[in-house]
């Protein structure tokens, strides 16, 4: 990434290894998923990403995305499929 691109995207923080292992299997699964996507992004193999997260207490749900404008329709379609899959899994 060029200096110009770095400035356009904002400041970048250096990441440090996690000292403590995840506390349970669900947490470990989330960490593995995030690390895999971080690896793909660092290798330049991703151009769009959408994340939905739920707080530990379940009271807060957040969404974040970084999306190439040409990928919006595809992301919306895949999120719709994911919504249907999640609804089917809870039955």
Image (cartoon, grey):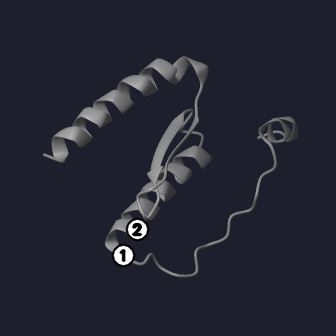
- 86 vs 38: above or below: above
Pick the front one: 19 or 63:
63
Q: Quadrant of the C terminus?
A: top left
Give the CA distance from mark 2 to mark 1. Answer: 5 Å
Label 2 neighbour load within 10 Å: few <14, some 14-19, many 20+: few
Q: How many marks?
A: 2
Residue located at (57% from left, 33% from top): 47
Q: Which residue is identified by label 1?
A: 24
Q: Residue at x 82, y 39 (%)?
A: 2
Can you say whether 74 is above or below 47 in the image? above
Within the image, what quadrant is residue 46 found in? top right
Which residue sits at x=58%, y=81%? 19
Q: Is residue 40 above or below residue 47?
A: below
Q: Which mark is residue 70?
A: none
Q: Which quarter of the image is occupied by the N terminus?
A: top right
Q: Is residue 22 above or below residue 13?
A: below
User: How far from the left and from the top, in percent, is residue 65?
Assistant: 56, 37
> Pointers 2 and 1 in contact (CB under 8 A)?
yes
* 59 with respect to 12 (left or right): left
Image mark for residue 27: 2
Left or right for 17, reference 3:
left
Residue shown at 77%/52% (left/top)? 12
Give residue 25's quadrant in the image. bottom left
Most distant residue in the bottom direction? 20
Q: Is residue 13 left or right of residue 47?
A: right
Q: Front-most of 83 and 15?
A: 83
Q: Secondary structure at mark 1?
A: loop
- Give 44 or 52, whichever is nearer the viewer: 52
Q: What x and y, as percent, mark residue 54? A: 44, 54
Question: Helix, strand, or loop for circle 2?
Answer: helix
Location of residue 51 in the rendering, given as x and y in whole percent from the top left corner = 49, 44
Name the outermost residue toward the front: 59
């Amino acid at each position: 990434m060029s200096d110009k691109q770095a400035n356009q995207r904002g400041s970048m923080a250096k990441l440090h290894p996690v000292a403590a292992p995840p506390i349970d299997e669900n947490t470990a699964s989330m960490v593995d998923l995030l690390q895999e996507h971080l690896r793909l992004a660092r290798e330049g193999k991703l151009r769009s990403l959408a994340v939905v997260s739920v707080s530990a207490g379940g009271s807060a749900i957040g969404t974040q995305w970084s999306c190439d404008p040409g990928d919006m329709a595809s992301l919306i379609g895949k999120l719709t499929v994911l919504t249907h899959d999640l609804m089917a899994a809870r039955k």
